[in-house]
Image (tube, helix red, strand yellow):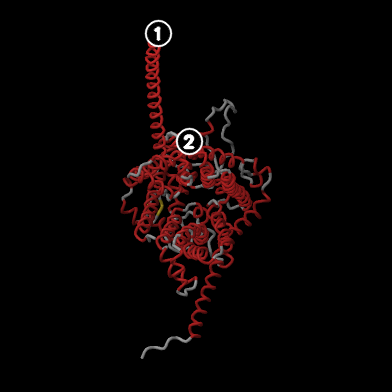
Amino acid sequence: MAITSTTSDLRVSVSMAGRASLATYERSKARRRRKERAIESVLLLAACVSVFTTAAIVYILLKESLVFFSNVPLWSFLTDTQWTPLFDDAHFGIVVLLSGTVTSSAVALSIAIPLGTIIAIYLSEFAGHRTRETMKPLLELLSGVPTIIYGYFALLFVTPLIQRFYPALPGFNVLSAGIVMGIMIIPYVSSLSEDAMRAVPMSLREGSYAMGATRLQTALRVVVPAALSGIASAYILGISRAVGETMILAVAAGMQPNLSFNPLEPAATITAFIVQVALGDLPHGSVGYQTIFAAGLTLLLLTLFFNLIGYWMRRRYREAY
Amino acid sequence: MAALPPRADELRAIIRAHKRWDFVFGVLGLLALMVGVLTLVALFANMAIDGVPRLTADFFTSFPSRRAGQAGILSAWVGTLLVMLVTAVCAVPVGIAGAIYLEEYARKNWFTDLIEINITNLAGVPSIVYGLLALGLFVYAFGFGQSILSAGMTLALLILPIVIVTTREALRAIPQHIREGAYACGATRWQVVSHHLLPYGLPGILTGVIIGLARAIGETAPIITIGALTFIAFLPPLPLTGDPPAGFFDWLFSPFTVMPIQIFNWTSRPDPAFHQNAAAASFVLVFMTLGMNAAAIWLRYRLRKNIKW
């Protein structure tokens, strides 16, 4: 009798204790789930910072540019041939700054694209393993040097060097800045092109060699056409890097707005103009303050345009293997 | 009548011509590489020859001055260090957290695509646009002023894509069975991340952070746009020093200068003695940048050795 009651007592007490610990377990599971969800939302917030940044860039540039365009008509912004925003008789022709950007980018890309492509083809098709492993870090080094040092190099080494052969060159000119900028962009073009070429399957090359082609013929007629979308996007990246470059041009090309496509003269690019105004005083709401945002908006639209072209070319011409 | 097939020696002549072109292109490739190498050599030699004689202890402990012989980079390198501190504190947690979300938690929907497109886009935005963003947002809208805090946050946004991309690669390199084993033992997703993935991914993440910081050290344009002044002859106030004693965070809001801006200022002057100062400061800056890159590679190698899977 006593045992049965003890057993039933025991069973009752065990089940009551069991239910209590089940409840505790359920509570701790709910707590852990809440904690997990909180952590996930914190991580999501961190990931959204990039979206906020883009939104903030667009918002700030548009907001200040709208103030600018309420004072300066868009038509004169696009067609005026003088850029004198800080004078009493102010002219706001963005074409002047664009000519500087176009000239410097043209000089830079005329160096970076041929040399970058040749280096990429050489490293991917011709060079041995040891050469490639030594050269790739060196090229990365080339792109890792801070651009202000390239500006110093362009102003104080390249310009005097060119002046020895062509004494009429002014101290500030777009040519030496463009040359140094081109050499700086070579690694961007060459490493992306080389990655694109390495992605081409070996079987295509082997087929070409089996037909008796030399390495150059294989490279030019089989590998490069197959890797064309990657190579084109490397070029586009080079272009957008050249357009957005600031310090080399601010130091070595002078900051004198000049509507000319002659690289042997000083010129100001969009980016150098922003630096020039920022070096002075920028009270909130002043003319200079608004002008740099309008210039910045132009720059952003330009780079966005090139990025979109690069993206479209990659989508359109990508070869699937 | 059909043409006769080319004779053997004609064929050999064609093949020889093609092989000659091959050789010519090989030479051309080497020459192109030499352009890059020679530029690097000329750059370093020029900086070393002009700048190294100037690298005395005084150079590191003096403020800039109107007299070239007495000018130094004290305010510049202290400013660089402080700005890098703020950049690291802002960029590292946000970047790693964002990368963890994108790799481990995100579902495949349009919102995730939007985030990824934004990150790719931001990597291609010119650095001066970040400076404009900072000017409008941090300096004026938030009211942080032209201070170390604004500069640090701007550079943090600049290197955020780098940190996110390298962290994602580090996480992706971890084999799936580690995650599966942890889930099989009943771990929650955060436990898997914090107990398993982050420790294993630490070498790659650290490498990415150091590479990002090495990039941020050399950035001049955004910091000029914020309004870092080029002639700073004082240091940001250390906490609890000065009269009245500076607060703990007063240094965040103080005017400042950084190494690239000091170099820019000295390069822009016509006096060749200042150019020598610029060369010396450039040498220090390149040394810092290369040192950080080398440290990143070495660290990745060392930490990677202990991992066996």
Secondary structure category for the residue under label 1: helix
Name the residue: 46% across, 68% down: A206
Name the residue carrying label 2. Answer: B194
Q: Position of residue B281 (x, y in %)?
A: 61, 48
Along the line of sight, which residue is nearer the eye, A72 or A33? A33
Along the line of sight, which residue is nearer the eye, B59 or A233? A233
Name the residue carrying label 1. Answer: A2
Q: Judge depth for marks 2 and 1 and give the one in front.
A: 1
Secondary structure category for the residue under label 2: helix
Mark 2 touching mark 1, by CB under 8 A?
A: no
Crowding around mark 2 (Cα neighbors within 10 Å: few <14, some 14 to 19, many 20+) is few
To which chain does the residue with label 1 belong? A
Along the line of sight, which residue is nearer the eye, B100 or A275? B100
Q: Where is residue A311 in the image (x, y as percent from the top left)?
A: 37, 55
Along the line of sight, which residue is nearer the eye, A150 or A197? A197
The N terminus of chain A lies in which quarter of the figure?
A: top left
